[in-house]
Amino acid sequence: MKVTPIYQAHYNDRKEHDSDRSNFHPQALIIGKIHIHALTTGQYLGTPVPKNILPGVSTVGFWNATGSQKWGLDAHRNEGIKIMFLETGHMPFVAGQRKFDLRAGNYTVILPGQMHQLGRPNIEAGKLHWLILDVSANQPLQQWRWPEWVMLTKNDLAELIVKLHHNKNPIWDSTPIIQKAFHDLAQCVLDWNKPHMVSSLIININQLLIGILKALTSQQLSENKELISRRRAVELFIEELKQSHLDLGELWTLERMAAHCRVGETTFSKYCREFVNANPIEFLNQCRLDRAARQLLEEPKLSITQIALSNGFNSSQYFATAFKERFHKTPRAYRKS
């Protein structure tokens, strides 16, 4: 994605904000570590849209972070209701004084004026969708005024507000309706210059709101234990790779990694993509290169060839090429720096 001036114009170094419009680090955009697509009727990042076209929509969009970032969104409040859905990856998240980890498939609703933070302190790899609706309130207990194009009945909207206020857990598992609504919203953002996008956006936002109301009304009391155990096995394996608790020099093929977790290759690949926003082999190579980078600095007696071989690379030349692609320096220059 080409970095447009609007993505750079709103950045500054403030530590506290009244909104998150200024928190995206422009350098992250420039080097392609995060791709942002959004519409805005205010001062948020994104393609400007006249307020009379989308009254009440402060911003809607998504980002795709291809790796861990060196920045995060500081604690801030929004004027409006903020709905976020994490499609892939995981995201450290703070709501009020409570710390959470958003997982792939989770969504959260932030009430007007509620303090929250993304990253602890930095943003992790993942695809995050969001919508901020102006409901004429900057405090949670103020009366909300929904945009006129919201089609839920007054009773349903009142019920939605009550459920949001009284639900103690800010993070929930999304439903197919919620996921589809966010996917369709993302497509509207990408296709904004095409005909009928305003109507499509309004319909999808209404579908999202009714989907959230239905989900809060009928939250499942228990999940499939087998599904939880399979997801957990893959999650633990990925964490062991990340922390170098497993021998990264071994021949870890997709088949062998899946077998280690006692799941099929397709299932393993699916969960891997959800947890780290990368396929298994890509993530394995990232872990190998990260460990090699630590060894270059912490174990000066090891040669570059020894480090390459101990991390599963067949040759120092291939290792040097992959290392430079990830860290923008050769292994030798990285060690000297």
Image: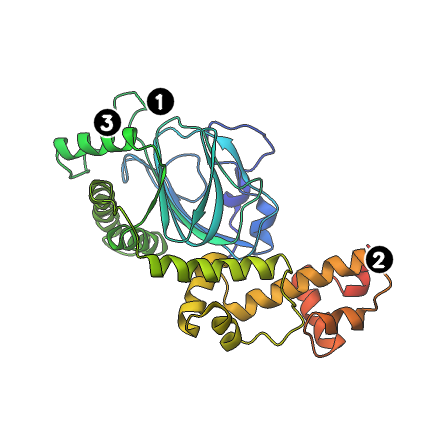
Q: Position of residue 20 (x, y in %)?
A: 47, 35
Left or right of residue 204: residue 116: right
Q: Which mark is residue 139?
A: 1
Q: Residue furthest top?
A: 142
Left or right of residue 95: residue 203: left
Q: CA distance from mark 2 to mark 3?
A: 59 Å
Callout 2: SS: helix
The residue nearer to you, when weighing 227 against 120, is: 227
The residue nearer to you, when weighing 117 against 39, is: 117
Disc 3 + disc 1, Cβ < 8 Å: no
Q: CA distance from mark 1 to mark 2?
A: 52 Å
Who comes first in sequence, dot 2 or dot 3?
3
Badge 2 density bin: few <14, some 14–19, many ≥20, Cα 10 Å: few
Who comes first in sequence, dot 1 or dot 2?
1
Badge 1 density bin: few <14, some 14–19, many ≥20, Cα 10 Å: some
Q: Is residue 333 visible?
A: yes
From what the image shows, is residue 189 above or below residue 330? above
| Residue under label 3 | 145
Q: How many marks?
A: 3
Q: Position of residue 210 (x, y in %)?
A: 20, 43
* Amino acid type for the residue under numbered disc 1: Gln
Q: Residue at x 47, y 27 (%)?
A: 18
Q: CA distance from mark 3 to mark 1?
A: 13 Å
From what the image shows, is residue 58 above or below residue 123? above
